[in-house]
Image (spheres, rainbow, N blue to C red):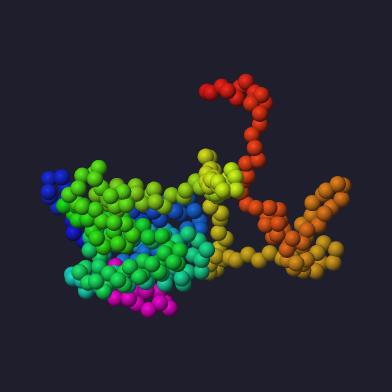
Amino acid sequence: MHVPRVDAEGQPTSETPFTDALSCVVACMNERILKSDTDLIGLVLYGTAKAKTPEGIMPFPHTYVMIAPDLPSATEIRELQAVRDERRFDEFGQIDDASSSDFSNVLWLVLLLFSGCAAAKGARKRLFLITNDPKPCGSSEEVRARVLGRCSDLRNGGVELQPFFVSNSPSHTDELRAAVDWHLILQVRPVDADAEDDDLDPAGVSVASCICDSERALFKRMQRTQHRKRSYGSVELSISDSHVLSLKMVTLVKPFVKPSATKLHAATNEPLTRERTVLCKVHGSVLQESDIFKAWEFGGSMVYFEPYELKHLKSDIGEDGLRLLGFKPAERLKPYHNLRA
């Protein structure tokens, strides 16, 4: 990652894949601050000479947790910018021999970070791997088996693995396209590096599409990957008892919501927590959740529902999804139904 890039004339440049990765991380943290107040971001370096982990997690060799999963802040962004601009890479160091490190350690460390973060439970968890190593497992079959086992643990834990391959030169791009280790990690079949585009295996295109040959390409792909999708639900359409279609619902227009403000304590600058208490208007006593009922006016009188009744409304009404009951006769169609814009 510290090897300089090569320009179109074959000359080395001042930028390296590592500095490009730091620039993309800084840009993504800036974007997350503006667009969301709930997204957590962490940064783990792999292949470092030093090891560092948060308190309570055992350190792994050649892994350095630079930022633990948390809401991005301006202080962390300035720190990353200083590391990139001033080339302060001695803080974590770099190993000369990549074969002395175990790639499965960083995968296991990421799983521990997600498991130890209370705010990440129940949320969508994604691991962005920025690397230029076509052989993360080296030539050891034992390391490869451990890496594949850790990848399976990540998937079982609900963590999505999304790689970003940084290429230094056209020859390096060919090596990444034919990397057997990454095809096994991503559970796709390898393709021939000398094959034409039309002859590529459709499953292997996903590996080739992850390759970025510039900082701009890396940032654009990372921006597309982290963008929230418009899908907000799915429903089944039953045409008959034996024919069911799955439909996905998407939003065509989505408003931009300003993140809610976080109140801080004036003395300690710590976030304030809120507690809500409901009091009875007549007696002034504290009402528990079981004492509160939902009411709806029906037929001139109020109908009260207990909390447990509301939970069973959806399941007791009927099956989920839509069912086609039939078609109207052709004579019921209006003239404008047969017109197209």
Q: Is residue 7 above or below residue 341?
A: below
Which residue is found at the position 55% from the left and 63% from the top?
Answer: 264
Q: Is residue 231 left or right of residue 288?
A: left
Q: Residue furthest front?
A: 242
Residue 133 shows in this picture: no
Is 141 contained in the magenta span?
A: no
Which residue is found at the position 45% from the left and 63% from the top?
Answer: 158
Question: Which residue is at the front of the view, 172 or 26?
Answer: 172
Is 56 contained in the magenta span?
A: yes
Q: In which quarter of the image is the N terminus?
A: bottom left
Where are the magenta residues, as a range? 46-62
Give the percent coordinates (x, y) of residue 273: 60, 66
Q: In this view, does 88 lie to the left or right of 127?
A: left
Give the percent coordinates (x, y) of residue 255: 54, 43
Give the percent coordinates (x, y) of residue 305: 78, 58
Q: In this view, does 63 lie above or below 257?
A: below
Q: Residue furthest right?
A: 300
Give the percent coordinates (x, y) of residue 278: 74, 64
Question: Which residue is at the front of the view, 332 or 51?
Answer: 332
Question: Which residue is at the front of the view, 271 or 300?
Answer: 300
Which residue is found at the position 29% from the left and 76% from the top?
Answer: 61
Question: Which residue is at the front of the view, 231 or 187?
Answer: 187
| Majority secondary structure in the magenta region | loop
Displayed quadrant of residue 176: bottom left
Q: In this view, does 69 lie above or below 252?
A: below
Residue 163 shows in this picture: yes
Which residue is found at the position 41% from the left and 64% from the top?
Answer: 155
